[in-house]
Image (spheres, grey):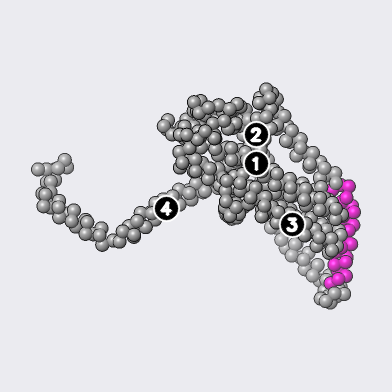
């Protein structure tokens, strides 16, 4: 008999021989190697998909970063916004109060920074000039034994080096202008996305859920709720961590008589939103100011304060408090921040922990099929709802 393509159908004996040959050839490959090969090609496919996703994110960073910033700010504003909605404040006034109130707080902090810098700048400049003169005198009379001519020669060489780099600096100015334009565009886009999320988060989420097959929508809805709840906890906890860092370092600078204590505290507060790394970098500024303005002894004590706050953050606030809030192991918090910084710099460090927390919670939720009987998420008040509801209302 012939097969559908016209070729003669193999006899029973030929088919049996082909099966034996196939079995013998597969038997020559150890089962462990076959399993490893099966895992290997699947891992390669997953790695290729992840690499493609990361490449697309990098290429579209001018859109992705404002979107992620808007989502994080929405999660940060959500508790107060939901509180107003629960107390029957109309949505539009609640949005205006949330957004304008946040901008007013940020503007107030910036004004306070500018006011203190203006009030103390003359004194800081005078002390800085005095510190430079003392350093110059120490280089002459200290162990190095440099002469005035040698110091002047080094300063001259430094000036020549800066002059030689003038072309590079001018070309960099154009790049900075472009970056400033991107920052302005990203800020406007972030505010627009924030307003859309607060205004019509329910519609956006329902549209997103409908992109998935109908049989998967309940699971996607529940996983999204769990992930959003984690983001809200992350934003709330990160605000607490940043406040503790700012109060600790700012108060230490004030008690030690270091100038510009308020600007230092504000910078520490903003920098602390980049976990672990941000407060360290901004704390160095406080130590530098103490060194220039107050001398080595006060600078040493300022360094002790900064290191103490960092130890508190590194061993208690970030691993324990943050790890508990986002349900990510303390080791993972440190590793994802380092990995995010290596891949995407400051934005990568900023978004690494919330993304890891979101992915972790969503994966656990889906793997445990929690939407089939998990009552813990039934009354979660999230962005797409203003009042608790039951699973019967799922998209």
Residue 145, quarter of the rendered image: bottom right
Is 386 situated above or below 368? Answer: above
Labels 2 & 3 near each other (Cβ < 8 A): no
The reply to whether the magenta stretch includes residue 136 is: yes
Of residues 343 and 297, the one drawn nearer to the viewer in this rendering = 297
Q: Which residue is mark 4?
A: 43
Is 337 situated above or below 103? Answer: below
**Could you tell me if residue 230 is visible in this image?**
yes
Where residue 60 appears, as percent x and y from the top left, is: 55, 43
Q: Give the Cα separation between the discs numbered 2 and 1.
A: 10 Å
Labels 4 & 1 near each other (Cβ < 8 A): no
Q: Is residue 164 left or right of residue 4?
A: right
Identity of the residue drawn at 44% across and 50% down: 46
Q: Which residue is mark 1?
A: 235
Q: Give the Cα separation between the discs numbered 3 and 1.
A: 24 Å
Q: Give the Cα separation between the discs numbered 3 and 4.
A: 43 Å
Q: Which residue is mark 2?
A: 78
């Amino acid at each position: 008999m012939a097969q559908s393509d016209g070729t003669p159908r193999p006899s029973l004996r030929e088919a049996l021989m082909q099966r034996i040959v196939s079995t013998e050839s597969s038997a020559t490959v150890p089962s462990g190697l076959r399993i490893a090969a099966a895992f290997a090609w699947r891992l390669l496919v997953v790695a290729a998909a992840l690499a493609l996703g990361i490449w697309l994110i990098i290429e579209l960073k001018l859109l992705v970063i404002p979107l992620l910033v808007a989502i994080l700010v929405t999660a940060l504003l959500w508790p107060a916004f939901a509180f107003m909605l629960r107390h029957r404040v109309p949505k539009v006034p609640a949005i205006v109060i949330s957004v304008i109130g946040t901008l007013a707080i940020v503007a107030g902090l910036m004004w306070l920074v500018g006011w203190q810098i203006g009030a103390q700048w003359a004194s800081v400049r005078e002390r800085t000039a005095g510190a430079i003169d003392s350093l110059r005198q120490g280089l002459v009379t200290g162990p190095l034994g440099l002469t005035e001519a040698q110091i002047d020669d080094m300063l001259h060489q430094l000036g020549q080096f800066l002059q030689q780099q003038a072309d590079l600096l001018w070309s960099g100015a154009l790049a900075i202008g472009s970056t400033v334009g991107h920052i302005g565009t990203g800020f406007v886009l972030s505010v627009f996305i924030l307003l859309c999320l607060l205004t019509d988060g329910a519609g956006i989420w329902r549209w997103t859920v409908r992109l998935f097959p109908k049989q998967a929508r309940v699971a996607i809805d529940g996983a999204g709720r769990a992930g959003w709840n984690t983001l809200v906890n992350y934003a709330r906890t990160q605000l607490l961590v940043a406040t503790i860092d700012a109060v600790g370092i700012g108060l230490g600078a004030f008690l030690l008589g270091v100038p510009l204590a308020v600007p230092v505290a504000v910078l520490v507060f903003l920098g602390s939103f980049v976990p672990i790394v941000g407060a360290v970098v901004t704390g160095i500024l406080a130590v530098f100011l103490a060194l220039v303005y107050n001398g080595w002894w006060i600078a040493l004590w300022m360094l002790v304060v900064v290191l103490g706050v960092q130890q508190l953050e590194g061993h208690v606030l970030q691993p324990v408090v943050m790890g508990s809030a986002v349900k990510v192991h303390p080791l993972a918090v440190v590793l994802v921040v380092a990995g995010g910084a290596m891949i995407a710099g400051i934005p990568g460090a900023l978004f690494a922990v919330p993304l890891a927390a979101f992915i972790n919670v969503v994966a656990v939720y889906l793997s445990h099929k929690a939407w089939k009987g998990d009552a813990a998420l039934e009354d979660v008040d999230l962005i797409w709802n203003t009042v608790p509801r039951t699973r019967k209302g799922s998209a």
